Amino acid sequence: MTTTIRATCPHDCPDTCAMLVTVKDGVAIDVKGDPDHPNTAGALCTKVSRYVERTYHTERLLFPQKRVGRKGEGKFVRISWDEALDIIAAKLKPIAEQDPLAILPYSYAGTMGLVQGESMSIRFFNKIGASDLDRTICASAGSVGYQYTIGAKIGTDTEQFEHAKLIIIWGSNPIASNLHFWMKVQEAKRRGATIIAIDPYRSFTAEKCHQHIALLPGTDTALALGLMHVLIRDDYLDHDYIKNYTLGFDQLAQRVKTWTPEYTAKICGIAPEVIEQLAQLYGKTALQGEAVAIRLSYGIQRTHGGGMAVRNVACLPALVGAWRQPAGGVLLSSGDSFPKRLDRLQRPDLRTTSSLQKQRLINMSTIGDDLLKPTSKEFGPAIQALIVYNSNPVAVAPESPKVTRGFAREDLFTVVLEHFQTDTADYADILLPATTQLEHTDIHATYGHLYMMANNPAIQALGESKPNTEIFRLLAARMGFNDPCFLETDDDIAAQAFDSTNERAIHFDWTSLKKTGWQKLNMPLAPFAQGGFPTASGKCEFFSAKMQADGLDPLPAYIPPYESAQSAPQLAQVYPLAMISPPARNFLNSTFVNVMSLRDTEGEPYLDIHPQDAHARGILNGDMVRTFNDRGSMIMKARITDKTRAGLVVGLSIWWKKYAGDGKNANELTSQRLTDMGRAATFYDVLVQVEKA
Ligand SMILES: Nc1nc2c(c(=O)[nH]1)N[C@H]1C(S)=C(S)[C@@H](COP(=O)(O)OP(=O)(O)OC[C@H]3O[C@@H](n4cnc5c(=O)[nH]c(N)nc54)[C@H](O)[C@@H]3O)O[C@H]1N2
Ligand SMILES: Nc1nc2c(c(=O)[nH]1)N[C@H]1C(S)=C(S)[C@@H](COP(=O)(O)OP(=O)(O)OC[C@H]3O[C@@H](n4cnc5c(=O)[nH]c(N)nc54)[C@H](O)[C@@H]3O)O[C@H]1N2
Ligand SMILES: [Mo]
């Protein structure tokens, strides 16, 4: 018998596609994009088209295992679920009695599902009173920067971009990481729109745009200030919009006076004319009443000033009145459009009063340092137990040499819930098999469009694998937690995910969403056409009192990278090349690296290096090269190309270390320094040297 099941792609990607899964005699045989979903439009990316291959992969973890080799060696023996749960409870109970803060969850967005990602697990750690994880590895710098200016992560509807006359793709590579948005851009292009990419690297996207502005990494903050200078100097302004719906224009005008194109250009490493022309095009097009839209994404906020970069770019649309048009404005993320009920999903009320008083936040981006910290007054108890799910920190967290040392600690008890034996799983004491999206129930918000999405299980759980929720339910029972919320089913949880009293989700009903698969939020077409920004003032805040109160510069400012030739000349004498490691098209962070057909397409870890830099080092195309700095080193194959600019090397990521020649990946080189806002990681703020291996 053949059936079709409505599902949702769970991966950390703005597109959150509506999938149709074909199941024959209990076996999933095909996944395809739902042709009726306005964003998915019948297409899946190359990676998720391989979801069946990934699900039935011969290396799927199918039963619980216990470590027998050294940590990191990856040697395990099969045990029963009962034994696994007993061992975990026996380890956690005494730690929890002594000091629950010594227990730490480590999770991110392996699945974006609110049920498998944000509910039972967090309830479990709230009940224990464990340390909280500050989930900052990806988006928190930009999120905070955007919120200071606009108020919340609400922006232009993806579906509107096809009507824009000018689209600036800024710090984003949609052909790789936001494919369905790129489909809208192509439609806009067919209708005559101009498309411009701002990216230090000539990505797949940048090479298909009308213009590519290859600035130095971490200098977008300056570029935005330079653009504002020209807009104000030449009066490309929507005075009416500025007067009614913005705050602090006069101070902003004063601030950007010194940001002449010449001055800005030096910092950004581009020509002054490029800044003049971009500002003119942006301002003129907007003032002619055409829609100008910016797709701003997270690639721009992985350097020291990442928060300020997003804040500054987010000021541009208000200056020219771009928000007046449905297809104008800026989209960083649609995430805050969704009225999520995290309180009901996560149940912070499970914490006792004393646990609330001594909460501790551990930043996931500094896990390397924090795992190595002994008990102290400032830090609190050393981390003794780590439960990892929906994440692969040994591959993805910065400054990996330290992360690995931390995970290798013999006295650390580590549990990993996974589909596969990842680099992190190699360090587990207990390794538990989790179900995939085809095997469990979930409900999704997204950060790229405006649809609530349902995922129905298509097949039975493979082997003895269990959903994250079920694993934490069983653990809760073993720990003796008998609060009724630990008995809720996945359907019970999904039904509470959105606030149906909020007008945006007024029609939300889980039973019907499961049937239809998706439903659009009620959102105004042009959310800020008449102001109404969700900031304290209700305006777009060029001047932010909140930033001032938080000890930050209340006006748009420039924050240089930690590591660059201009900002750290001494370091640059030893390590003269900047390095970025954005996603490879066929991987999703470190997910899919073990799917043979996709890894074959990516080949092996490459280092893209400019001909000038290669020549100066006697490097030929295809040579194995060693990239290094004080933190670590890795060997890659050199690809000599002018896709990158002189002074910048690019290592597309995130490779599983075990599939790289020397067992290392780009995070050997990245640092644990945090951004100006949001306490986020600075993956693209790195200086290195390269030599022939
Ligand atoms: N295929 C694929 N898709 C993905 C992912 C994946 O790994 N693979 N990851 C998902 C996740 S978790 C996220 S957060 C998003 C990430 O996707 P994006 O938000 O688009 O961010 P990145 O891919 O990190 O970077 C995008 C572009 O920014 C450029 N960039 C690097 N530094 C700078 C800079 O300082 N300034 C500017 N202007 N540009 C810079 C990079 O060269 C890259 O081409 O994509 C999601 N989608
Ligand atoms: N050098 C460098 N490092 C980076 C980045 C970069 O651009 N360059 N990007 C950063 C960014 S933006 C991000 S978001 C992070 C991403 O880091 P992570 O969130 O750790 O993402 P993944 O590497 O995809 O690992 C997710 C894991 O979750 C597992 N998983 C998926 N679904 C489930 C489930 O239902 N249950 C369980 N138990 N497990 C599941 C998958 O098998 C996979 O191994 O990496 C960051 N690291
Ligand atoms: Mo991310």
Image (tube, rainbow, N blue to C red):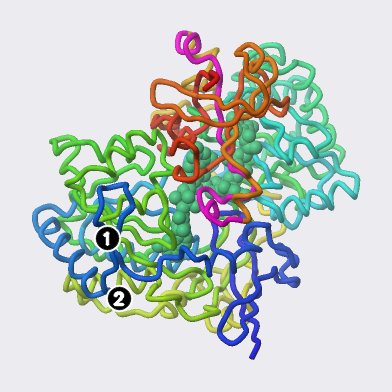
Write down the quadrant of residue 631 in the picture: top left
Label 1 amino acid?
Ile
Q: Is residue 546 visible?
A: no
Q: Is residue 338 magenta?
A: no
Tell me, for residue 430, which label it has, or none. 1
Query: Looking at the figure, which quarter contains the N terminus?
Result: bottom right
Q: Is residue 585 visible?
A: yes
The residues colored magenta run: 570-596
Circle 1: element type: strand
Q: Residues within 10 Å of mark 2 (few under 14, many from 20)?
A: many
Residue 459 on image: x %, y %:
52, 80
Circle 2: element type: helix
Q: Establish whether ligand 2 lies closer than 8 Å to the Cβ of label 2.
A: no
The residue at 57%/80% (across/down) is 27
Residue 342 on image: x %, y %:
41, 63
Task: Looking at this view, name the residue that lies furthest to the bottom.
Answer: 1
Residue 8 on image: x %, y %:
59, 69
Q: Which residue is mark 2?
A: 485
Residue 662 on image: x %, y %:
45, 35
The residue at 62%/18% (across/down) is 619
The residue at 41%/80% (across/down) is 492
Q: Answer whether labels 1 and 2 touch (C-beta < 8 Å).
A: no
What count of labels does the image hold? 2
